[in-house]
Image (cartoon, helix red, strand yellow):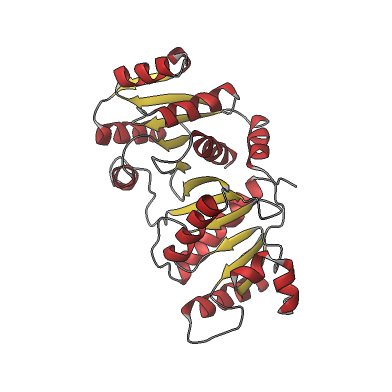
Amino acid sequence: MIAKLSQVVDLVKSKPKKRLVAAFANDDHTIEAVNHAVELGIVDATLVGDETAIQQVCKQLNINAGKFTIIHEPDDVKAATKSCDLINQKEADILMKGALSTDKYMRAILNKERGLCPPNATLTHIAVFENPAYHKLLVAGDCAIIPAPDLKQKQIILQQIIKTAKAIGIEQPKIAIIAATEQMSTGMTACVDAAILATMADRGQIAGALIEGPLSLDVAVDEEAAKIKKMTGGVAGDADGLLFPNIESGNVFYKSCTKFNKAEVGAFLAGAKAPCVLSSRGDSSLTKLYSIALAAAL
């Protein structure tokens, strides 16, 4: 069982190497993470950004800039567009956000002419947590993109959680559909949607995982709470994945894990033509490395 994100890095080493393109890669955290990934043999890398700034950061970090392909583009919006072009031209497999804002990064991905969003696609944010308080990795979504997913969007997020879990070696992932309570309450949309999705899974309409819902968070991840509340379906107390009902719950979970419990995390944007690493500009180089590894695993 893979219980640490470092094991995902080891897993990716056994796969064919991918080419990563980093959009506006002028910052030290991005370059440090990409350099580490290159040294580990996970990816080859293209850095799109201000070449002078990139060379300066490499010098400060004592990194040989010659190991990267550098494309000079000092404008952050144009750098993001050029990076998407490389994906569309089959010259790169993974997109990564550098020192530009998330809204500019997303606009490049969503651009109808030169972006990476297929027609009618749903983009979603998938994160994998290594939480010191939990006994294995935990895949979760959506934590950053879709404010209030409807039932169809929840099904797509669920399928991306399953796909990610399988990519990191979980053959039959146990997925909890989260609500405020494990009791069925028809007045709560989260409960109703969870029950529908769980029924769809029981009938084979959603394949590849053991799915239960609605489940409260404590029941999903705490074996003792599951026993006390007499939840014995197989997912309760031992979830591999969590589907959140809205962005508030997913985002608060993400930040609670990382800020209060010092969880390590890797995250990416799923549903585009290629996996897109979507980490905060304030994230550590280690978080970005783990995010690269997850994207390469996909």
* Residue toward you, 220 or 12: 220
Residue 247 image point, x, y percent: 43, 63
Q: Does residue 38 sit above or below 197 in this rendering?
A: above
Residue 182 image point, x, y percent: 61, 78
Task: Tell me what residue is drawn at x 29 percent, y 23 percent.
Answer: 50
Residue 205 at least partly seen: no
Residue 15: image quadrant is: top right
* Residue toward you, 16 or 12: 12
Q: Is residue 192 left or right of residue 166?
A: left
Q: Does residue 30 sit above or below 188 in this rendering?
A: above
Q: Does residue 220 sit above or below 22 in this rendering?
A: below
**Furthest residue in direction left, as rendered:** 75
Task: Tell me what residue is drawn at x 60 percent, y 52 percent.
Answer: 163
Residue 173: image quadrant is: bottom right
Residue 60 at least partly seen: yes
Task: Tell me what residue is drawn at x 65 percent, y 37 percent.
Answer: 6
Q: Does residue 201 sit above or below 253 in this rendering?
A: below
Count every numbered label the image shows and give the total: 0
Task: Tell me what residue is drawn at x 71 percent, y 53 percent.
Answer: 135
Q: Is residue 4 left or right of residue 26?
A: right
Residue 94 image point, x, y percent: 47, 36
* Residue toward you, 293 or 257: 257
Residue 24: image quadrant is: top left
Q: Quadrant of the C terminus?
A: top right
Residue 126 image point, x, y percent: 51, 52
**Furthest residue in direction bottom, as rendered:** 186
